[in-house]
Amino acid sequence: MRTILLAAGFGKRLMPLTKDIPKCLVPIKGVPLLEIWLSRLVEFNLGPFLINTHYKSNQVESYVKGSQYSNKVTIANESLLMGTAGTLVKNLDFFQGEDGLLIHSDNYCMANFNAFIDAHQNRPKECLLTMMTFRTNNPSACGIIKLNQKGIVTQFYEKVTNPPGNLANGAIYILSAELLVTIKKELSEAKDFSTEILNHLIGRIFTYETQEIFIDIGTPEAYKKANS
């Protein structure tokens, strides 16, 4: 399954760690986060990959060129950040009209992608994408979701005080081919995936909750936790 890995951000919340290195290359127990992603996804026979770059893009490109995954990766450099939806819209043709993965690569994720894909393939017929979710100990710092009995998203609570639960959006999605067509026809001006596309799809987003380790590497504290 073709996969877009979003890796262009500045990682401002991880400063000063990201002063000299892009967020996607910060090491977890000595291994760059992007390498962890690529090695795990390849283990599940996923790919090829498109990786967008911006901040310290030369480092990301050098890493990919020197890695064992170079023949599986296309680099899409953005001289100006396009936003998570903007990157997707620009690269819709990468999926070649088939279902595909969209992944925020600033997560440390040990999820079973075979189970994730199975959930997507057996999703309710009205759902256009499947979102990976996880349980968080810090719900006010995450995008919390509310589900109906079928596991479909009915409401979002984006980093609010005292959200009603701790089931969080993992920012890992399987997009259906039907959704890709919808985005091209109706949402081609979108810049932010969460606010402009997900909110448009409430009632049509299926979910898969991983029970494995899942850490949003967004703060120094979370980074230390991942390394522990």
Image (cartoon, rainbow, N blue to C red):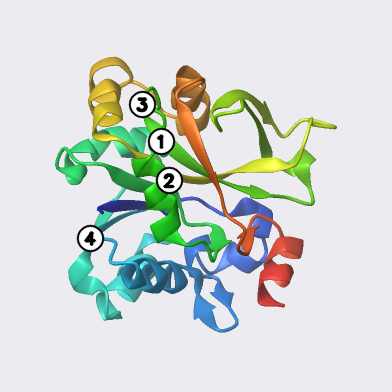
Q: 226 or 121, which is in the foreground?
A: 121
Q: 202 or 158, which is in the foreground?
A: 202
Query: Residue lying furthest bottom in this view?
Result: 30
- For the residues bearing labels 2 and 1, Cβ distance under 8 angstroms: yes
Q: Amino acid at mark 1?
A: Arg
Q: Which residue is mark 2?
A: 119
Q: Determine the residue positioned at 67% across, 65% down.
A: 16
Q: Which residue is mark 4?
A: 48
> Where does the image place residue 40, in percent across and percent down from the top left?
41, 70
Q: Secondary structure at mark 1?
A: loop
Q: Nearer the viewer, mark 3 or mark 4?
A: 3
Q: Secondary structure at mark 4?
A: loop
Q: Which residue is mark 1?
A: 123
Q: Amino acid at mark 4?
A: Pro
With respect to residue 195, does 76 lie above or below?
Answer: below
Spatial CA distance of label 3 from label 1 is 6 Å
Residue 83 appears in the picture as rendered: no
Label 4: how many Cα within 10 Å (few below 14, some 14–19, many 20+): some
Q: Determine the residue positioned at 46% across, 18% down.
A: 200
Spatial CA distance of label 2 from label 4 is 21 Å
Q: Nearer the viewer, mark 2 or mark 4?
A: 2
Q: Amino acid at mark 3?
A: Lys
Spatial CA distance of label 2 from label 1 is 6 Å
Q: How many marks?
A: 4
